[in-house]
Image (cartoon, rainbow, N blue to C red):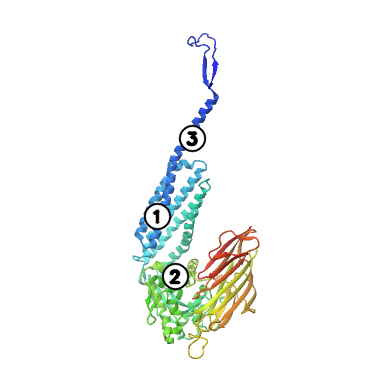
């Protein structure tokens, strides 16, 4: 039976109002089992209704996710449109992205999101979604500012630079608008920092979304932090606060210095209220006409400066351009007295060729049409093709006007600046400013040409011409480094360098003079710049032990490095080798007894034929990489190896752990 039967048999008494015949009847009362069942059904009904309500309330959250993805797609399309110089289309995409972001914020911030935020566990996912959308909101604000800046500095309608005049008001506007991007980036990064991605089931997708956002925003933030101070300094550099005068030097990789190409052509560039004017073009012969040798006060601690009178073209022997740039300014002013120079700008033929690829070719009579593809070969590799020394000098004299014409004419300023910034990574373009604060700003942007300051493993192999030849055009250099990494992060290294003179045989009448324009001899000095805190154990030249002295500059303004060097003279087709064995304290950043990160920086020299590097690193016993090796590296049985040319500065890092 589903009910219990009980007899009610109360005696009738005074006050009994029960109807007659009802005394002692049986009454059915629900059982406890049924009451429990009804209670459970009631609870289930409440749960179902609540679940249905939560499901309905969750729909806006799902919509918010869809809107956020649509906004991301629009921002990507906006970037593609800008790459095609379609500003109107980029604006439309960013406008659409803003609409999607606002709808996503409305969906995620409504009643449904508020309710779900109080649900245990699931509430964390709601918070994560809101933080991600807020980060997207700030990113969209960055895009809105960027699309306002872009037409000022780039595209056919750009008004920032017209001929040799820079609109200072527009330049300041660009600097101010760029500065306003910073707070949006900071808030976006802060929102992402608050994303935990710890909710079951959806945590992995949340973490993936956060990682994707960081992959986009982190380099953008780093670029902003580097370039915003640079932009703020530009108005002053182009004469907003008074005239500024710079030495423009064209560098020729056919005659190398440790710093890069030889400085064989010059002019002064003066800015006043944003207007650039240029002085007379000067080449090496004009300097020699003022006397073969000059004397100037050297940079203190610079071991590459001779205490005797020297040629201005020898001022740039130091591989640190913050040293060579200052030496060049002092030497140039000794040859050509005039108002003080505020800094130096240097660009070599490879950098000039990259600029020509942006601007297109020009005619340089009598050398024909010069383009990005034939510039280096024509201007550096064909000295033997000219009929006279005067013709070769004429070529040098045309380098400065060619740069001036290509940089200041024809628009596309943003692309030109990008080209020079990319050239700076290969040390094909450098700047030096006597204002130390400005120099630091440009140094942080990688534009000052100084050597890497890494305290870890380092390779820098440079040569400088000693016989006035142009044979460096054919120089080939092969660098082999074998590093045995130790558990404490120190290392033992063997460095082997082969230099080959690949010039064609001398075919002019009479014997090869051994120096000057026509010779095919490569007379040079080679230097191996070493990791910091290195101890050189042995050195060899052409396989024979030679006790080369170890030099250590003492210049206050740079991070100095020990180096060894050796002169050599090679006829066409000949080679020489130099070896150094050394130990150094820090090849890796040691985190604890089981974890370290091997780090290697390489500074290239701007050879026409890029240096080829063969780097082998042997890991400490038991250690292995915890991530994929850097591009170009491959695993070996006992470590890793890189083989290939290095044309730009590199900074490799390989995390290791003991298994």
Q: Residues within 10 Å of mark 1 (few under 14, many from 20)?
A: many
| Residue beneath disc 1 | 74
**What is the x, y in percent for residue 626?**
58, 58
Q: Quadrant of residue 482?
A: bottom right
SS of the residue at dot 3?
helix
| Label 3 to label 1: alpha-carbon separation | 40 Å
SS of the residue at dot 2?
helix
Q: Are marks 3 and 1 in contact (CB under 8 Å)?
A: no
| Residue beneath disc 2 | 420
Residue 512 horizontal side relative to residue 547, left or right: left
Q: Is residue 195 visible?
A: no
Q: Is residue 408 visible?
A: yes
Closest to the observer, 321 or 96: 96
Q: Mark number for residue 89? A: none
**What is the x, y in percent for residue 95?**
37, 54
Relative to 365, residue 109 above or below? above
């Amino acid at each position: 039976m589903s009910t219990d039967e009980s007899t009610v048999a109360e005696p009738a008494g005074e006050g009994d109002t029960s109807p007659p015949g009802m005394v002692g009847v049986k009454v059915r009362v629900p059982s406890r089992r049924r009451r429990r069942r009804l209670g459970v059904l009631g609870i289930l009904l409440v749960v179902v209704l609540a679940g249905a309500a939560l499901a309905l309330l969750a729909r806006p959250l799902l919509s918010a996710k869809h809107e956020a993805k649509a906004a991301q797609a629009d921002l990507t399309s906006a970037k593609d449109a800008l790459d095609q110089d379609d500003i109107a289309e980029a604006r439309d995409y960013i406008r659409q992205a803003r609409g999607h972001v606002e709808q996503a914020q409305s969906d995620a911030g409504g009643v449904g999101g508020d309710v779900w935020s109080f649900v245990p566990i699931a509430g964390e996912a709601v918070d994560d979604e809101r933080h991600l959308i807020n980060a997207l909101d700030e990113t969209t604000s960055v895009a809105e500012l960027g699309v306002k800046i872009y037409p000022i500095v780039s595209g056919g309608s750009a008004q920032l630079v017209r001929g040799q005049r820079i609109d200072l008001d527009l330049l300041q506007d660009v600097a101010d608008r760029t500065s306003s991007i910073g707070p949006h980036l900071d808030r976006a990064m802060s929102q992402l920092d608050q994303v935990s991605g710890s909710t079951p089931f959806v945590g992995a997708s949340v973490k993936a979304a956060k990682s994707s956002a960081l992959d986009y925003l982190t380099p953008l933030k780093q670029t902003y932090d580097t370039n915003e101070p640079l932009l703020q300094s530009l108005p002053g550099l182009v004469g907003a606060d008074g005239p500024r005068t710079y030495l423009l030097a064209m560098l020729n990789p056919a005659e190398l210095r440790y710093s890069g190409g030889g400085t064989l052509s010059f002019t002064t560039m003066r800015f006043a209220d944003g207007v650039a004017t240029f002085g007379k073009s000067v080449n090496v012969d004009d300097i020699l006409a003022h006397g073969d040798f000059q004397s100037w006060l050297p940079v203190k601690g610079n071991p590459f400066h001779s205490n005797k009178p020297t040629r201005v073209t020898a001022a740039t022997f130091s591989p640190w351009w913050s040293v060579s740039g200052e030496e060049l300014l002092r030497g140039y002013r000794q040859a050509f007295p005039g108002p003080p120079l505020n800094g130096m700008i240097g660009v070599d033929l490879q950098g000039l060729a990259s600029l020509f690829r942006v601007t297109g070719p020009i005619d340089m009579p009598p050398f024909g049409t010069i383009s990005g593809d034939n510039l280096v070969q024509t201007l550096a590799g064909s000295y033997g093709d000219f009929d006279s020394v005067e013709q070769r000098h004429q070529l040098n004299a045309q380098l400065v006007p060619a740069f001036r014409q290509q940089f200041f004419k024809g628009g596309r300023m943003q692309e030109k600046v990008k080209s020079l910034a990319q050239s700076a990574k290969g040390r094909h373009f450098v700047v030096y400013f006597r204002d130390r604060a400005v120099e630091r700003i440009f140094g942080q942007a990688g534009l000052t040409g100084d050597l890497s300051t890494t305290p870890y493993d380092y390779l820098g192999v440079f040569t400088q011409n000693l016989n006035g030849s142009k044979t460096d055009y054919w120089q080939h250099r092969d660098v082999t480094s074998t590093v045995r990494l130790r558990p404490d992060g120190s290392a033992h290294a063997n460095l082997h360098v082969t230099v080959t003179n690949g010039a064609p045989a001398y075919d002019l009448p009479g014997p090869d003079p051994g120096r000057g324009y026509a010779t095919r001899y490569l007379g040079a000095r080679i230097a191996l710049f070493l990791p910091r805190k290195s101890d050189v154990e042995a050195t060899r030249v052409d396989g024979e032990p030679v006790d080369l002295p170890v030099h250590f500059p003492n210049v206050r303004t740079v991070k100095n490095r020990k180096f060894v060097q050796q002169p050599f003279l090679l006829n066409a087709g000949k080679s020489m080798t130099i070896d150094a064995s050394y130990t150094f304290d820090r090849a890796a950043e040691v985190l604890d007894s089981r974890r370290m990160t091997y780090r290697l920086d390489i500074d290239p020299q701007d050879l026409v034929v890029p240096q080829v590097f063969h780097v082998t690193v042997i890991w400490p016993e038991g250690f292995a990489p915890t991530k994929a090796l850097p591009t170009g590296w491959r695993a070996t049985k006992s470590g890793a190896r890189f083989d290939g040319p290095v044309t730009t500065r590199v900074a490799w890092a390989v995390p290791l752990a003991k298994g």
